[in-house]
């Protein structure tokens, strides 16, 4: 099902045989999302975690409450520092991690919530911050992923809509960098930038172009991996008004 006024735009870039297609689609039309979310299960088959930690914390106050969830499943030689302050219904968290594995963090206050996940089989550098109080959430994330499999996803949910941004790559010598900012209260929004193999595949204009619509943008590319195989990477920002798109909704960081 194609949105009225939809357009396809093809951008050829200098790196060999890479083609990026930005495609406006209906909420039912993003097959790339299945590929991206499936990367988590595949990646965990190849990364044996040296440590796995799950944390849940909540606080309540006169203006409401806030809750934070997190799961860290990291490989050998990984590092993790996560500082959290909470009280009176307000919550603040700062997290920094390196190493192969998977990180899932979520925070909520009232009807606003932000859930994010990053994973890589070789190298992962991650920094994130969360602030939640009074029914609103503000979050930021910066991550660099490299190896043969890597992915990220952020889902921000509010009363009126749910917005997600997800991306990943498959192929030897792959890498991806992402910087996202999310807010969620009555309305939810995620903006930022992402690049793979030095090619920008998400920018502020692309993310903001779907705000207020039931729409998604699929950015998909093929590249020659280090083992000379044809591999792929992609990013999908998506916005759903009203009832969230079930294919994108991650109920908690503990969901696999």
Image: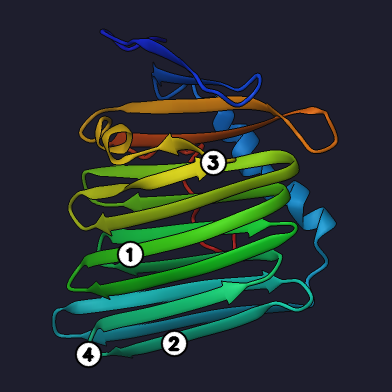
- Left or right: residue 36 versus residue 122 is left
Residue 173, visible in the rendered structure:
yes
Name the residue nearer the viewer: 110 or 84.
84
Residue with the mark numbered 1: 139
Disc 2 to disc 1, C-alpha distance: 15 Å
Residue with the mark numbered 3: 198
Q: Residue at x 26, y 8 (%)?
A: 5
- Left or right: residue 252 versus residue 59 is right
- Classify the position of the N terminus by image quarter: top left
Q: Say whether disc 4 or disc 1 marks the residue closer to the N-terminus.
A: 4
The answer to whether the residue labelled 3 contacts the one labelled 1, judged by CB atoms less than 8 Å apart, is: no
What residue occupies the far left of the structure in this picture? 63
Residue with the mark numbered 4: 88
Name the residue nearer the viewer: 51 or 227.
227
Q: Residue at x 38, y 83 (%)?
A: 58
Q: Secondary structure at mark 4?
A: loop
Disc 2 to disc 4, C-alpha distance: 17 Å
- Give the colouring mode of the picture: rainbow
Q: Secondary structure at mark 3?
A: loop
Q: Say whether disc 3 or disc 2 marks the residue closer to the N-terminus.
A: 2
């Amino acid at each position: 099902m194609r949105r009225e006024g939809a357009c396809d735009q093809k951008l050829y870039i200098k790196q060999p045989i890479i083609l990026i297609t930005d495609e406006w689609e209906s909420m039912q039309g993003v097959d790339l999302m299945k590929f991206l979310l499936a990367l988590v299960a595949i990646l965990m088959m190849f990364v044996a975690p040296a440590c796995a930690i799950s944390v849940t914390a909540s606080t309540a106050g006169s203006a409401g409450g806030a809750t934070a969830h997190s799961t860290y499943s990291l490989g050998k030689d990984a590092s993790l520092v996560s500082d959290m302050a909470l009280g009176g219904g307000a919550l603040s968290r700062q997290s920094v991690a390196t190493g192969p594995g998977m990180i899932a963090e979520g925070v909520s206050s009232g009807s606003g919530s932000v859930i994010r996940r990053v994973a890589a089989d070789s190298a992962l550098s991650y920094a994130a911050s969360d602030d939640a109080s009074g029914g609103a959430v503000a979050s930021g994330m910066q991550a660099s992923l490299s190896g043969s499999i890597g992915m990220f996803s952020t889902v921000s949910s509010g009363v009126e809509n749910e917005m997600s941004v997800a991306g990943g790559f498959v192929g030897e010598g792959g890498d991806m960098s992402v910087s996202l900012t999310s807010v969620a209260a009555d309305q939810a929004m995620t903006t930022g930038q992402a690049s793979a193999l030095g090619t920008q595949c998400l920018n502020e204009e692309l993310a903001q172009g779907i705000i207020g619509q039931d729409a998604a943008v699929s950015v998909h590319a093929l590249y020659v991996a280090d083992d000379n195989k044809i591999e792929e990477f992609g990013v999908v920002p998506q916005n759903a008004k009203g009832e969230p798109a079930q294919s994108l909704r991650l109920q908690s960081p503990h969901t696999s």
